[in-house]
Amino acid sequence: MRDAVFPENRHALYEAHGYSPAIRSGGFLFVSGQVGSRPDGSPEPDFERQVERAFENLRATLAAAGCGFHDLVDVTSFHTDPEAQFGTIMAVKNRIFDRPPHPTWTAVGVTWLAGFDFEIKVVARLPDAV
């Protein structure tokens, strides 16, 4: 079984690009890459705010499935300029994941994110599947 999960105030990118923000399947929630988009789908221009918005969009998608950041088991983040962005990303990340156990995390440098500079993709366990 698999079913799509949409946050309450979903942004325009889901319809524009034809994908689901998350799929619930087999006791897990597989979340599509979340970016720092405004409600109209455009990128937040300030980098730190873009990272914060990506986490806000992620939080909304997790909440729609009854999950939170404490349910994350695996994280992959994508960065257009990892060396220059690392400090800002870590500051935001450390505010959200402020104590162990931390999820696994893989950071990947990329050359293109459709106008964005940061994207975060996760797998979470569904609380009712525990």
Image (tube, rainbow, N blue to C red):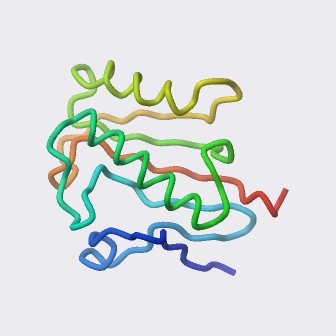
Q: Is residue 123 left or right of residue 80?
A: right
Q: Quadrant of residue 18?
A: bottom left
Q: Residue at x 29, y 34 (%)?
A: 109
Front residue (pair 2, 69): 69
How many marks on residues? 0
Q: Residue at x 51, y 52 (%)?
A: 59
Q: Is residue 37 left or right of residue 120?
A: left
Q: Residue at x 59, y 25 (%)?
A: 98
Front residue (pair 44, 33): 44
Quadrant where the C terminus sits is bottom right
Front residue (pair 125, 97): 97
In percent of width and height, residue 14 lies at 33, 73
Quadrant where the N terminus sits is bottom right
Q: Is residue 22 above or below residue 108?
A: below
In percent of width and height, residue 77 lies at 40, 40
Q: Is residue 109 above or below residue 53?
A: above
Q: Is residue 1 above or below residue 37?
A: below
Q: Residue at x 29, y 49 (%)?
A: 36
In percent of width and height, residue 38 lies at 25, 58
In percent of width and height, residue 3 lies at 60, 79
